[in-house]
């Protein structure tokens, strides 16, 4: 009951999740626009001069919207754990995220249709990609926020892999593109492993599916870049978008069966960090249980 006293109303999750999806997920894009407006940097990504809520124009648009929409969805979905009622929290997170998607997507389409932008209109399919990525992130966030501890790490596997691309987006003039930065990957994976443990040491077995998911998905950034490089007006992927699945599979499948490109040193650092975070969470849980027993006997 004491924990419920610190919960918030599900109604608060609606605006918070909406803000998390756009204001949080697309924060690198907002930062790039601010760099252009204030003159702090030259050569900002295409589209900043004619601001769109969603960066669906430009050469790096595909990777950028997938990374930012997905990570924003993860944060928005995780907010579902804030209310006392999980069902109400999940409904509020979904509703708030959908409102943000509709608002940002509608505003982007309207502004692009008015013209005066570096590109002629916003491709509708890019808005669809943004929505799909956002919904995928929302599902992962709900699983991370409301699911059992072993599945929490699995849900965070894809966000861990794409996190460095999101952070690189804050560098003036730099696109939101994954670069497999080893230390960002190590920290993200370590935290994900630590969060996969709640109160029982047996939950450390949940590291196995988490590690497997991250290992398989570690080439996702390269796969997104490969899809982006094969997109141009009149390209086969433009005519048959489902061909992107074949390109992604061609990048991920070979990488999953070889240690090359997996940054084994980063894995070692991540395991050590994960063990430290897990130990901290287990000790805190043990201290809470001891405190409750002391109060019961008092």
Image (cartoon, rainbow, N blue to C red):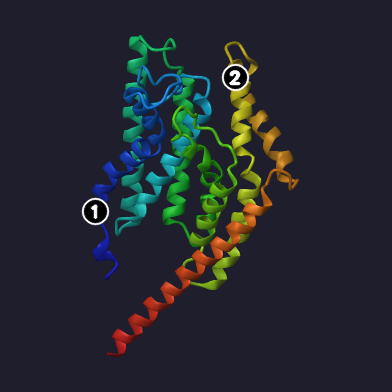
Q: Quadrant of the C terminus?
A: bottom left
Q: Nearer the viewer, mark 2 or mark 1?
A: 2
Q: Quadrant of the N terminus?
A: bottom left
Q: Position of 209 compared to 146: left or right?
A: right
**Residue found 27% across the figure and 42% down from its top:** 15
**Residue found 59% across the figure and 31% down from its top:** 224
Q: Position of 167 compared to 229: left or right?
A: left
At which x and y percent is residue 220? 61, 38
At which x and y percent is residue 132? 48, 33
Query: In this figure, which residue is indicated by the disc labeled 1?
Result: 9
Location of residue 200 with respect to 293 vertically, above or below: above
**Residue found 44% across the figure and 45% down from its top:** 74
The dot on residue 231 is 2
Chain-order first, disc 2 or disc 1? 1
Q: Label 2 to label 1, Cα distance in Å?
A: 44 Å
Q: Position of 271 compared to 298: left or right?
A: right
Location of residue 6 with respect to 117 vertically, above or below: below
Q: Quadrant of residue 127?
A: top left
**Residue found 40% across the figure and 30% down from its top:** 29
């Amino acid at each position: 009951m004491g924990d419920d006293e610190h919960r918030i109303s599900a109604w608060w999750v609606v605006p918070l999740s909406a803000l998390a999806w756009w204001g949080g997920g697309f924060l690198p894009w907002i930062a790039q626009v601010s760099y252009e407006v204030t003159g702090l940097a030259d050569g900002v990504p295409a589209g900043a001069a004619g601001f769109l809520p969603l960066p669906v124009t430009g050469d790096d648009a595909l990777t950028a919207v997938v990374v930012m929409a997905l990570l924003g969805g993860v944060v928005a979905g995780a907010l579902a754990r804030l209310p006392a009622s999980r069902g109400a929290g999940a409904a509020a997170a979904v509703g708030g995220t959908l409102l943000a998607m509709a608002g940002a997507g509608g505003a982007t389409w309207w502004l692009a249709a008015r013209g005066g932008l570096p590109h002629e209109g916003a491709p509708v399919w890019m808005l669809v990609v943004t929505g799909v990525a956002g919904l995928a992130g929302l599902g992962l966030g709900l699983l991370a926020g409301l699911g059992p501890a072993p599945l929490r790490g699995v849900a965070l596997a894809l966000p861990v892999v794409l996190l460095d691309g999101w952070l690189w987006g804050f560098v003036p003039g730099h696109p939101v593109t994954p670069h497999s930065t080893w230390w960002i990957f190590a920290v993200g994976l370590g935290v994900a492993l630590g969060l996969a443990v709640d109160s029982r040491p047996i939950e450390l077995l949940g590291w196995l599916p988490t590690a497997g998911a991250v290992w398989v998905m570690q080439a996702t950034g390269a796969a997104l870049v490969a899809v982006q490089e094969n997109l141009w007006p009149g390209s086969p992927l433009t005519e048959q978008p489902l061909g992107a699945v074949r390109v992604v599979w061609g990048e991920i499948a070979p990488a999953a069966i070889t240690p090359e490109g997996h940054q084994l040193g980063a894995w070692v650092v991540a395991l050590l960090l994960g063990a430290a975070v897990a130990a901290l969470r287990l000790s805190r849980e043990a201290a809470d249980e001891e405190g409750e027993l002391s109060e019961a006997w008092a």
